[in-house]
Image: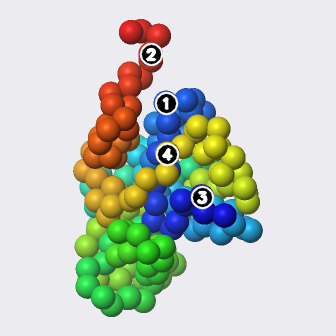
Amino acid sequence: MDDGIVVGSLLVATPLLDDPNFRRSVVLVVEHDHEDGTLGVVLNRPTEVPVDRVLPPWGELVTGPSVVFQGGPVALDSALALASVPGEDEPLGWRALDGGSDVSRVGLVDLDAPPALIAPEVAQLRVFAGYAGWSAGQLRTEIEEGAWYVLPGEPRDVFMDDPERLWQAVLRRQGGDLAFVATFPDDPSLN
């Protein structure tokens, strides 16, 4: 049962998805199991909250914009971080996303670890409040209903300087019909 979803792939909201939690969102899959379901983080929802206000020790390591991102509607009172690590080593406090995708040098950071432990190894870091989650089979159903495109992720997606433009950028680089979807207006009724 291959649904095309692997850790490191992107779930890109189609224009049909109007749930305000996911409208025009780009979700990085961080865990996927056919029995347990899928977890991901929304990459393009920066908040106004500076990281150093909620996690002061991590503020200096964050890649701009230096704010907390809303990773999804689940567990907004918890935080997780993603970091890119150059080279082949796996530093303490960091676990690579292991899906065989192009984001293999992006991983989850243990925010309970001392930042000084991982700081010399991190090239980029971003903090997310909450996550997106789907029970077993739920995401597959949403994909079949036309809510999501499943696309390959790239390391630059996680740390894009202008995250509000990520939805268009990911679609545009696909070419063909999906590049055309990137031009879909925010409100088609105004056309």
Horizontal and vertical percent for residue 118?
Answer: 35, 83
Residue identified by numbered label 3: 3
Per the model, the C-alpha gap separating discs 1 and 3 is 20 Å
Single out the mark in the foreground, 4 or 3.
Answer: 3
Mark drawn on residue 15: 1
**Label 1 element class:** loop
Residue identified by numbered label 2: 188
Per the model, the C-alpha gap separating discs 2 and 4 is 20 Å
Foreground of the two, 114 or 137: 137
Per the model, the C-alpha gap separating discs 4 and 3 is 11 Å
Quarter of the image where the C terminus is located: top left
CA neighbours of label 1 inside 10 A, class few (<14), some (14 to 19), many (20+): some
Foreground of the two, 141 or 185: 141
The disc, 4 or 3, on the residue closer to the chain's N-terminal end is: 3
Horizontal and vertical percent for residue 158?
Answer: 36, 58
The disc, 3 or 2, on the residue closer to the chain's N-terminal end is: 3
Horizontal and vertical percent for residue 179?
Answer: 32, 37
Per the model, the C-alpha gap separating discs 1 and 2 is 10 Å
Single out the mark in the foreground, 1 or 3.
Answer: 3
The disc, 1 or 2, on the residue closer to the chain's N-terminal end is: 1
CA neighbours of label 4 inside 10 A, class few (<14), some (14 to 19), many (20+): some
What amino acid is labelled 4 in the image? Tyr
Per the model, the C-alpha gap separating discs 4 and 1 is 10 Å
Looking at the image, do the residues carrying marks 3 and 2 touch, with CB atoms under 8 Å apart? no
Mark drawn on residue 149: 4
Q: Is 98 above or below relative to 190?
A: below
